[in-house]
Amino acid sequence: MNLFLFAFGALFSIINPLGTVPVFVSLTGNQSKQAKSRIALRTSRNVLFILLISFFLGKYLLILFGISVNSLKIAGGLIIATSGFALLSGKFNEHKGIKKEKVKRDIETRSEITLTPLAIPMLAGPGTISLLITYKQEYDDLTSVVLIIAAILAATISIYFILRSSNYIERVLGASGINALSRIIGFIVIAIGVEYVTSALINVLRISGL
């Protein structure tokens, strides 16, 4: 159960669905309530597929490119920490490469937004993907795998309900409230990233006999 809470907390913080609320509201402003609910459902479904694929097949990318787990943890930790700093500075969207004007122009030429930009890169970014690849290498027994899958499901369900309630959340919290919560989450995300980098460095030093 501790692993479930640990994995869910890390995933929820790094995915940061609350930070996606303003973008979701902006992109679905002209949609009906039912349409917004369908978009939220398809977005969370796409995120679920991406996370499960990353968790189960990510190790083959490591083998293909000859990347060690410690190297992945360092790279992923740096990405995660950078995301945290972006949350603290209020530049999360820019960090994800999301500019509202550019996205709106792109949306005018196509109707599907649930895969890009919502699922990728807003929600399932490289930090989340590297985290899950690392989890699969560190927790490979059946019980741990089941708990992590449950955490992935819980995280994607929370994405659905948060996006579905995005207009209500924005009215209640406002831009300043969402920004304040994102800054708190950003601090947690930085700590997660630093923890991954330091643990990988300790492993490297231990292997080197230093």
Image: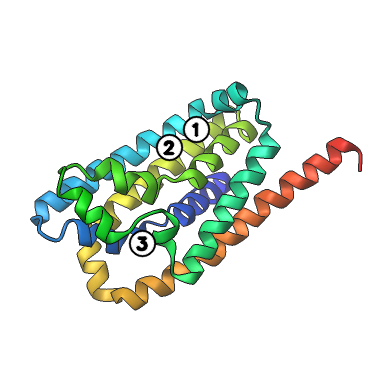
The residue pinned by badge 1 equals 55
Q: Secondary structure at mark 3?
A: helix
Kind of residue indicated by mark 2: Leu
Q: Amino acid at mark 3?
A: Leu
Dot 1 surroundings within 10 Å: few (below 14), some, or many (20 or more)? many
Mark 3: give few (<14), some (14-19) or many (20+) Cα within 10 Å: many
Q: Is the residue marked by circle 2 packed among few (<14), some (14-19), or many (20+) residues within 10 Å?
A: many
Q: Quadrant of residue 204?
A: top right
Is 94 located above or below residue 123 in the figure? below
Circles 2, 3 touching at the beta carbon (< 8 Å):
no
Earlier sequence position, callout 2 versus callout 3: 3
**Mark 1 and mark 3: Cα distance apart in space:** 23 Å
Residue 99 visible? The answer is: yes
Q: Residue at x 38, y 47 (%)?
A: 121
- In x, y percent, where is residue 88? 50, 69
Q: Which residue is mark 3?
A: 18
Residue 165 in sight: no
Earlier sequence position, callout 1 versus callout 3: 3
Alpha carbons under labels 2 and 1: distance apart: 6 Å
Numbered tag placed on residue 51 in the rendering: 2
